[in-house]
Image (cartoon, grey):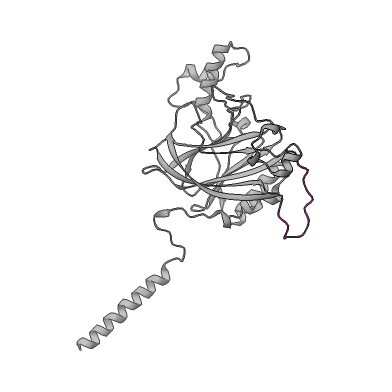
Amino acid sequence: MLSVLFACTVLAVFAMTASAKDETPEEFTPDQEYLAETEEDPVIALWDELEGLPVEEAEERYRQCLLDAGYMEVYEETNVTKPMDMDDETYDLAYSDLESADPETQEKILAARRVIIFQYSWQADDGLGFMYDPTTKEFSFTPRFSDLFPGWDLPVEPGYPKKAPVEPETVEPESVTEEEAETGHEPEEPERPDDAGIQPLYDTITSDHSTYVRKFASGTGLTDPFYSFTIVAIPAYCPVSITAKTLPTGTSKYNFGITDEYTGSSIYWRKDCTLNQKIPYTINQTSDEHRKIGFRVSTYQNPGNGVFRITRRYWGA
């Protein structure tokens, strides 16, 4: 009897273990850690197809891609109101006439505006930014700066420009290709043959970067850049994407900003990003000057170390 009872117990335990194994997803990830891999990202797969398209058409292509993938669109806040910690006098100053003010008052107006500006997510009018979250299956497009703040200029930090843009002949040799050096960094775009074995004009690079996520300072979107690169192609279509893989202990949200490092002008700002959310932004470069782009992160919560995955398109010919 004891032998039979033991055998039944073993079989029962085996059956329970097998059942639990069958119910466990193959890609089970404990504690909702980093989930999304850019190599399998349908949005990034569209980058090559969308080059040269008007912003409105590219936005619609992205939207349809995400809807087809089972995402639901949500909408960002676009009703600008007075910040709770701002007094009426400062709020009225922000909306006063900048052009007619004396230089000292202009600085006060711009400072007041920066406090309001960084209370919202926004993008430069010539760019294209949005968010999509593989864990919630939601996505949203970032509002245009001019829609939120009509008549205002993109925020520029005091003290800029810190240095003049790098002229083509002074670019570091290792930062340009041999073809660019011979042609003044304005290479003619080669014909794209149908042969799939030929290297494409552009390539995509993905890398992980660890940085200290600092506390957000009121009235500014800028902390020191933890990642930067120079756009030298003219014109340039430069999609980028960032995803938080880890955040500081006790921190669930962070802010992400993209800045022109030569002028100090912010061109993209998204607040309250969370782990696993993908934040793509397309920089459409039309200027004939080189442009250094900086990525910055901050938090309203606990500062500390974080790891961010960055994917971007770069000159690969």
Name the residue nearer the viewer: 181 or 13: 181
> In the image, what residue occupies the spot 45% across and 65% down?
25
**Magenta includes 189?**
yes
Q: As drawn, is 286 to the left or to the right of 228? A: right
In magenta, the rendered stretch is 185-200
> In the image, what residue occupies the spot 73% across and 57% down?
198
Total tally of numbered discs in the picture: 0
Q: As drawn, is 255 to the left or to the right of 18? A: right
Q: As drawn, is 245 to the left or to the right of 145? A: left
> In the image, what residue occupies the spot 61% across and 55% down?
42
Residue 110 seen anywhere in this rendered image of the structure: yes
Image quarter of the N terminus: bottom left
Q: Main secondary structure of the magenta part?
A: loop
- List x then y, in percent, for residue 153: 62, 25
- The relative height of residue 53 versus residue 105 in the rendered view (above or below) is below
- List x then y, in percent, for residue 259: 57, 33
Q: As drawn, is 94 to the left or to the right of 18? A: right
Name the residue nearer the viewer: 60 or 47: 47
Quadrant of residue 29 within the rendered picture: bottom left
**Magenta includes 104?**
no
- The relative height of residue 294 versus residue 163 in the rendered view (above or below) is below
- List x then y, in percent, for residue 55: 69, 41
Quadrant of residue 289 within the rendered picture: top right
Residue farthest along the top direction in this orientation:
102
Residue 70 seen anywhere in this rendered image of the structure: no
- List x then y, in percent, for residue 295: 54, 38
